[in-house]
Image: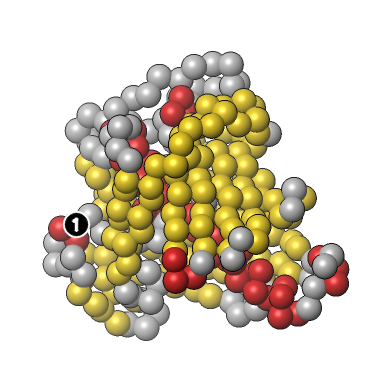
Amino acid sequence: MKDKQLSKYQINKRLTFFIALFPFILLTAKANTVNTSTTVKVVKPKGTTPFLKPFTANYSILHKSKKVGKGVRKLVYLNDNTLEYSYKSDISWLIFSDSRTEISTLNYHGDILTPLKYEYKREGTGPDKHYVWLFDAKNNTATNVKKKKTVTVDFSKHLQDTLSYHLQHRLKMIEHPEQKQFVYPVIKTSGKVQNYVFQYDGEEELMLPYGLVQTIRLKREVIEKKRITYAWYAPKLNYLLVKLYQVKDDIEQFEIQLTSLKVEE
């Protein structure tokens, strides 16, 4: 059935898959240039020294090979041990629109990130959403600011928010490139904690809008939802996420591809 012939139920269902896909985008990069012919040396973290330079990474969002939106990731250092990791995206597909912004404020030490604050805004077709969470690792608490509700959580296992875990994942890949499985406890906007698991799934050379890149492919499978997400990371770009693809019930959902990268010196 063609896209323009989709029923309202089918379109809403696919939009839901898209909304679930976006938070996964997105990870940061260390590179000296956007020229793919330049080899970038992987730099491992040393203490609290910023080991990832401030950057902006741009992505195209595709559905059935057609561009339907764009996304951008930014990393900014606020001081010697605090950084801000943000994400903004816009999509227009059929009768739907979706615009969202996520911002995580984090402490860092080596390759370990500790969330301080998380904010999420979403506008477009369907209900708008706005969440603000404050985190207190010392006292193992997380507070939903708008609902004025505090829950007890366990920061001893390096708890992440629904955006910061992307950056934590990339830093772990930089520090432990031989590792085949990664598990991250993530506090969701509901206040519940869930483990996100990523498994090594092979290597592949890709031609993307950014250029030709050699990649490591990981897979995340959510069995109860019959959803599989494949993510490709480029070792020579310090394990930047360069492509992401998701299927649900064996049906293609959305694809994300890196288009450009700007890193501040």
Q: In which quadrant of the rendered view does residue 33 lie? A: top right
Q: Residues within 10 Å of mark 1 (few under 14, many from 20)?
A: few
> Which quarter of the image is occupied by the C terminus?
top left
| Residue 244: % across, % down | 56, 47
Left or right of 239 in this view: 65: right
Q: Residue at x 58, y 50 (%)?
A: 245
Q: Is residue 130 above or below residue 31?
A: below
SS state under label 1? helix
Q: Nearer the viewer, residue 232 or 158?
A: 232
Q: Is residue 44 above or below residue 83?
A: above
Task: Determine which residue is flagged by label 1.
Answer: 157
Q: Residue at x 30, y 82 (%)?
A: 149
> Which quarter of the image is occupied by the N terminus?
bottom right
Left or right of 5 in this view: 33: left
Q: Residue at x 71, y 55 (%)?
A: 63
Name the kind of residue labelled 1 in the image.
Answer: Lys
| Residue 7: % across, % down | 78, 78
Q: Is residue 76 above or below residue 154?
A: above
Q: Is residue 151 above or below residue 256?
A: below
| Residue 143: % across, % down | 29, 74
Residue furthest front as drawn: 250
Q: Nearer the viewer, residue 213 or 58?
A: 213
